[in-house]
Amino acid sequence: MRPFAGLRYRRKDLSEVLAPPYDVITPEEQERLHQRDPHNAARLELGYGATGDTGPDSRYERAARTLDLWREEGVLGYDEEPCLYPYAQDFTLRDETRSRVGVLSAVRLTPFEEGVVLPHEGTLSGPREDRRRLMLACQAQISPVLALHDDRDGQIAALISGMMSGEPVAAAETDGERHRLWRRGRDQATARYCELLGRGPLYIADGHHRYETALTVSRELRQAHPEAGPDAAFNCVLMLLCPSQQPGVVILPTHRVLRLGAGAQWERLTANLQRRFQRQALECPTGRPLDAAQRLVEMLNQTDGATRFGIYTQAQGCSLLLVRPEFMPRQPGPGGIDELGTVLIHRLLIDPVLGSEAPASSVDYVMDEGEALRRVDDGRADCALFLRPTTVEQVKRVAAARLRMPGKSTYFYPKAPTGLVMSDISPGRAIPSRP
């Protein structure tokens, strides 16, 4: 962990300029963010244009020119000294207010095999290349990787709390969330924080593509600029580091919504349900499928283990599914990965019905059970499968075993916003290793 001279908006209220990470911005939200403020971070993070754009008017080059202009105009500016940036994100989930705290820091890039930074999901070449082109064009890391670390004795959380004294240097209210950012220069607290976190491991929660892209860009810039020393800024990655034991670290379930083609797929679905699952229809006194689905999800969240699922079809409504014991793994696999809900539901039901190479158009991933129901009821899908969320401990066990979960196994909520702090990685900049 290293303090760094962050590139930040020269305004205290960031409500109009923060944006979500690129991979959750819909076209509609992209338009809304661009119209919200002429300096919204989405203009850097996800400008208009296709990912395949090339040439001087590509969205990557436009982002680079915009970043340069904002620095020239004083919209963005550098802090005068290297800092750590404690951050608190307050949000409401199921009528309960929670807070997730962490520290924005520069973290030395290391290959996964060294075991300092550990992934839990795989990545795709398309998003990696998209982020690579943006990072190289802007010579900056626009949004942070979200990572977790252990803090079982609460020592790190106490340090973070102490670094949050005084007025925040920036704050925002966005879509029901409250954001507060502090700035802390080099002192005993930041030195102790860096010492404790330097032991690792760090578990990537969100931003696998950004981390792998940063590794690639670092290698490319080292080759292009051999004169840059080990403290070159491009050897680090911008991370939001959060203690994993706090109640504000939340993983939402990612439900599966299936589109079945020919009648043969319906037959395979029915056969696999009968053979591999015990099915219990869920009574719905109100007659509203949404009430039944919400009750079903609550039941899943209240159980231990990953052997329970939910299913909804128009013909049969909501049912609870329990994996028959003979179809559970006989021996626990490394990191417990064979017992993950996402692994089981694909191995026992989705893959046998759609095929392991099913096109992406056959499966949608949604977090909201109401949206899953609507897609079935209006004919956009045929079947909704409800999963309980993957736990933080499962994420850490799988990552520690050097394994990768299936795609869409986790949805860490809320997303860390883009625009709080950015990191300039141009070859002339350095981030000293001394805290």
Image (cartoon, helix red, strand yellow):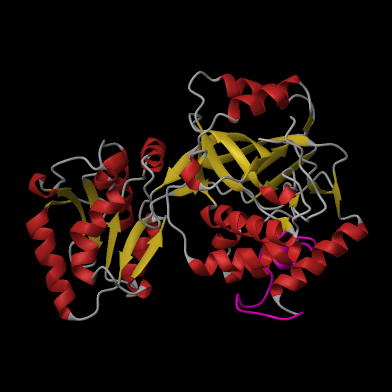
Image quadrant where residue 85 sits:
top right
Residue at 30 percent of width and 54 percent of height: 386
Can residue 79 be seen here? The reply is: yes
Image coordinates for residue 210, horizontal then vertical, percent: 58, 55
Position of 267 with respect to 145 (left or right) is: left
Image coordinates for residue 79, horizontal then vertical, percent: 85, 42
Residue at 43 percent of width and 56 percent of height: 122
Can residue 288 be seen here? The reply is: no
Task: Please determine whether, in this image, residue 429 is positioned above or below residue 359.
Answer: above
Position of 417 with respect to 334 (left or right) is: right
Residue at 64 percent of width and 49 percent of height: 144
Q: Is residue 50 magenta?
A: yes
Image quadrant where residue 191 sits:
top right
Image coordinates for residue 254, horizontal then vertical, percent: 38, 54
Magenta portion: prevailing SS class: loop
Tell me where the magenta segment starts and ends, as one range.
34-56
